[in-house]
Image (cartoon, rainbow, N blue to C red):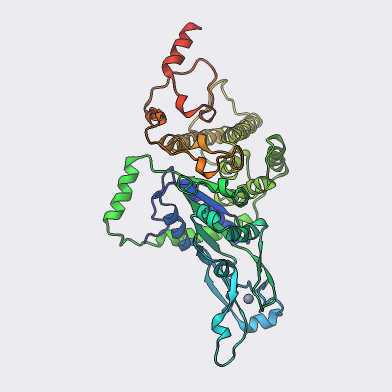
Amino acid sequence: MNSYSSLIRHSGNRELFLFLELAILSQNKDYPLHLHVEGLRGTGKTTIIRAARKILPPIERIRGCLFNCDPQKPHCPQHRHLSLEEILALGTEVVPMPFLEISASAKVGTVVGTIDLMRMTSSTRPEAALLPGTIPQAHRGIVFVDEINRLADTSPELADVLLDVMGTKPGRLQIEESGLPRLEIPAQVSVWAASNPDEDPGSLEDIRRQLSDRFDFLLEMGRPGDPKIVAAVLARGSKGGTEYDLTGDRIREKEFAQWACLLSRVEIDDELRQIVATLYTKFNLESLRAVEALQYGTKVYIARQGRQRAQVQDLLAVAPAVLRHRVEPARLIEILRYLRNLSEEVGKQTAAAASVPVEKGKVQRGKSTAASGGVQGKVGLWQRIREYVSRRLEQIFPNQRGQKRRRPGRGGGGRSGRQGRGSGSGQSQAANPSQTSILAPPRRARPLFEIAAEGSIFPEVEKEKGAGE
Ligand SMILES: [Zn+2]
């Protein structure tokens, strides 16, 4: 089994690594963030998620408490009425942050809680008691749901449980079992989910839109595009899997402690908050969760970067994951363009304020050293845009993904309406854009996402038009 730090990162999976770390950092500060990663089978989603348990920071709990009671704020039925002295008398212990899994075939009783049959049938002192399920036992930790689209399809009652748990921060959980008093407890779990929308029963968005919206972030897992990366993965496999170097993971644990300290001090200033609020009204975002996730996600992102102050370009780094399951692709592009323009304006203002002479029509490159912002911020932004576009190209062209995301519950069709991919369609004949020489178009270029995948590039047509004008 691999250590987390030794897993190979590439443009297709880098986003998942980053947002897993943001979720861990946030959960360490008692604020659960939920993330869902979509991608084809065999791209390594679950491998990375399961490896991330090795970098989870430990938690302190009341000794032996199955509900992981925080000694400072106990919540379970057994400990919540105890005084601090009584808790200290019980003692505390440091345990790994919980990481528990819910399978698509799980039962509500095992996930929520059920009668403890061991205690009920005890020969010495039989009593009716509650055995907490996966979610209460994962309090202050992570719950991983693989194939969440299947779970939502075959087990709507479990999807309802997740809706409650993910509805507020922290969530609530009701445990009802006949013969026992109804119990309502906080459930502070960070839900990580994975699915392959190309396989039955389709994407979570189509099956249970409400549950899809509960996820703060939706990440798209891409395949490695560079043969060198694939060769590196193969080389690791040929070592027989004996390599288990945890040094990198221990370093990452220390970094988490530093970032967690920083997170308490990170500021989102009023100006940036105003921009986030404007996105909600200007672009008619349906859910307030989107802007909440954008604001808080940016805050955690800043701490993860080792900084204290957020800038517009930081919103740009977080916005795709926050918005791609909440708005149409074309609207997402509009929002990113809006933020990009704002970021460039801020850059110009900063450059002007610092009296940096910027030659008209020319971008200064490669001189950045320390502080971000200004012209240097601009260069960073362009790098990010370039990475973003190449990532999207990689995702769109192998399976024509980007254009096909539909808004669920509209226009009928449902899951069965999902089209088969690739096989013999004209789209699979499209040229690889990275190997095509593109002539500069005579008119203003449009983003790829506004153009149908079939007609993305027509260099010859553009050439003729250009000659005629
Ligand atoms: Zn307890």
Looking at the image, which is closer to me, 14 or 469? 469
Left-right relation of 35 to 224: right
Image position, residue 187 (x, y; %): 63, 65
Left-right relation of 181 to 106: right
- Please tell me in which quarter of the rendered image ligand 1 is found: bottom right
Image position, residue 56 (x, y; %): 51, 62
Q: Residue at x 30, y 46 (%)?
A: 231
Looking at the image, which is closer to me, 82 or 196? 196
Task: Decide if residue 210 is in sight here.
Answer: yes
Looking at the image, which is closer to me, 237 or 366? 237
Quadrant housing residue 46: bottom left
Q: Is residue 182 above or below residue 407?
A: below
Image position, residue 175 (x, y; %): 65, 70
Q: Is residue 318 above or below residue 192?
A: above
Image position, residue 104 (x, y; %): 50, 59
Task: Decide if residue 307 is in sight here.
Answer: no
Kindly give the residue lying farthest to the bottom in the view shown: 124
Quadrant in the picture for the N terminus: bottom left
Left-right relation of 60 to 454: right
What number of labels is visible? 0
Kindly give the residue lying farthest to the top in the view shown: 468
